[in-house]
Image (tube, helix red, strand yellow):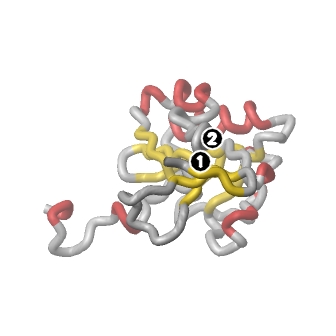
Amino acid sequence: MPSKTNGSVFALGDSSRYPYAMCARLGVPKIVKPKRKSPPYPFILEALIPLNPEVRPMFSGFAVYLGDKIVLMLRDSPKQLEDNGVWLVFSEVANLTDAGIRRDFPSLRLIGLLGGKIDHWRLIPADSPTFESEVLHACELLLQHDLRIGRVPQSRQTRPGSPRSN
């Protein structure tokens, strides 16, 4: 039978495996943080439909793959709002100091969460006034198979003797 001590409710009884009273938390609803079930910015995936994109949850966002290449990450998280938007993944052949990239994506910047450790990922911030137009331009470049965007992550690269290389 529960006993009440100093305003707290405790579960007591012979069946308890604990040597002391435990708070039963009766009537207290469990706080559950809702998880995003669908990627943000659906207009991006609609624009990429002809390329049959694959979307997977990744870290605090959704990674977008075209074949084996990761090309984008869509992020809209309540934590570290300054890194929300579209993370572009540039290829090994992309020259990120090229003025053409700056013309294509004027709001492009480093991603704070990555701490400068992954240089080939850049952010088009969601709070940029040109966010939609820049992202749609990135989609156009992907539809044109621009070699500057996309990279096969190490986890998807084939290794000698692996089943994927056959």
Q: Which residue is mark 1?
A: 25
Q: Residue at x 68, y 46 (%)?
A: 77
Determine the residue positioned at 71% across, 71% down: 115
| CB contact under 8 Å: marks 2 and 1 | yes
Q: Residue at x 25, y 72 (%)?
A: 159
Residue 32, above or below 111: above
Q: Residues within 10 Å of mark 2 (few under 14, many from 20)?
A: few
Q: Amino acid at mark 1?
A: Arg
Crowd class of label 1 (few under 14; some 14 to 19; many from 20; radius 10 Å): few
Res 89 → quadrant: bottom right
Q: Where, quadrant-wise, is the C terminus in this rendering?
A: bottom left
**Looking at the image, which residue is at 64% across and 45% down?**
75
Would residue 157 appear left or right of 166 to someone viewing this image? right
Residue 96 can be seen in this image: yes
Q: In the rendering, which numbered label is found on residue 9?
A: none
Q: Is residue 140 left or right of residue 6?
A: left
Snapshot quadrant of residue 96: bottom right
Amino acid type at mark 2: Val
Residue where numbered disc 2 is placed: 28
